[in-house]
Amino acid sequence: MQIGVLGATGPAGRGLSARLAANGHEVILGSREEERAAEAVRRLQERWPDRSLALAPATNEGAADAEVVVVATPWIAASTTAEAVADRLEGKVVISMANALAKVGHEFQPLVPPRGSVAASVQAAVPRALVSAAFHHVPAKELGDIDRPIESDVLVCSDHPEATALTVDLVNGLPDLRALDSGELSNAAPIEAFAAVLLQVNVRYRTRIALRFTGLDDGRVGAPRSADAVRAAAARQGVAGDHGQENP
Ligand SMILES: NC(=O)c1ccc[n+]([C@@H]2O[C@H](COP(=O)([O-])OP(=O)(O)OC[C@H]3O[C@@H](n4cnc5c(N)ncnc54)[C@H](OP(=O)(O)O)[C@@H]3O)[C@@H](O)[C@H]2O)c1
């Protein structure tokens, strides 16, 4: 799959780009300045000279032309960055990985962005895109160390079943990551906020923890459900698949 990453020059975007490329995806690294993206690609290629990673530099506009687009900017810039390329995102799955956090002294504190979460702000900025939220708790350094597997659960939520299905599929295609469909985009608020808790624990115990839920066996998590299956299940429960509104 061809995946564009907006703000790919930071640790999170670079790490995710490397991990995706190491697993067969073609990744376009976007930046406000193409030269910075080119430098990021150079650094990744130099780190793994023996791997043929399909990485290409671009502006954020160029990255937004990809089939699927990830927003990996700081939270404050996520919706404006997506809005600036809104016409290129129409009808596409757009994955928001940004967390709204502040470091106050030694404490990480979650912030409440407009509409409750960064992902919801991005969805409002690009209403014709299918926004999902994912990758919030996966540390950049481990993501980018593609010689090692990265074991973690990845909570995925969206108001669009097809975006959930594609994102779940993408995550599950990365060895040792396990995607969990966490419902509608309203759940992006606690998912993003929980990143502050993980960072705080990391500081307290001088480590880098990952998220793993118990009580699920892989058989039950299984393959991502298709958009049709999600809609059918939602209809059986008496709710609309796309937006979770009550059926009339
Ligand atoms: N770091 C982690 O471990 C981690 C893990 C999971 C999720 N996240 C989330 O992923 C996002 C990116 O994290 P990061 O640590 O990589 O962030 P970062 O280094 O601060 O920013 C990433 C990139 O965003 C672009 N950017 C910065 N300010 C911008 C602005 N005002 N407008 C538009 N673009 C701007 C920059 O790229 P250019 O200057 O090249 O345009 C920058 O290199 C954050 O929201 C973070 O919460 C991080």
Image (tube, rainbow, N blue to C red):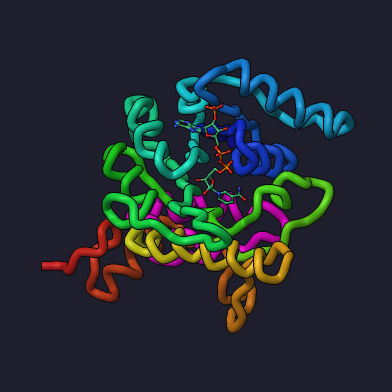
Residue drawn at x 33%, y 25% is 87
Residue drawn at x 62%, y 16% is 35
- Does the magenta portion include 246? no
Q: Is residue 223 visible?
A: yes
Residue drawn at x 38%, y 26% is 85
Query: Which sits in the foreground, 6 or 238?
Result: 6
| Farthest left residue in view | 248
Q: Which residues are magenta?
A: 155-183
Residue 233 located left or right of residue 17: left
Q: Position of residue 12 (x, y in %)?
A: 61, 43
Q: Position of residue 69 (x, y in %)?
A: 49, 36
Image-quadrant location for residue 218: bottom right
| Farthest right residue in view | 50
Query: Which sits in the foreground, 159 or 80?
Result: 80
Q: Position of residue 22 (x, y in %)?
A: 74, 40
In the depicted structure, whether residue 154 falls above or below residue 24? below
In the depicted structure, whether residue 146 falls above or below residue 52? below
Query: Which sits in the foreground, 6 or 162?
Result: 6
Q: Is residue 70 visible?
A: no
| Farthest front residue in view | 105
Query: Which sits in the foreground, 126 or 247?
Result: 126
Q: Position of residue 206 (x, y in %)?
A: 73, 65
Residue 215 located left or right of residue 24: left
Tally of marks: 0
Quadrant observed for ligand 1 in the rendered image: top right
Image quadrant in which the C terminus is located: bottom left
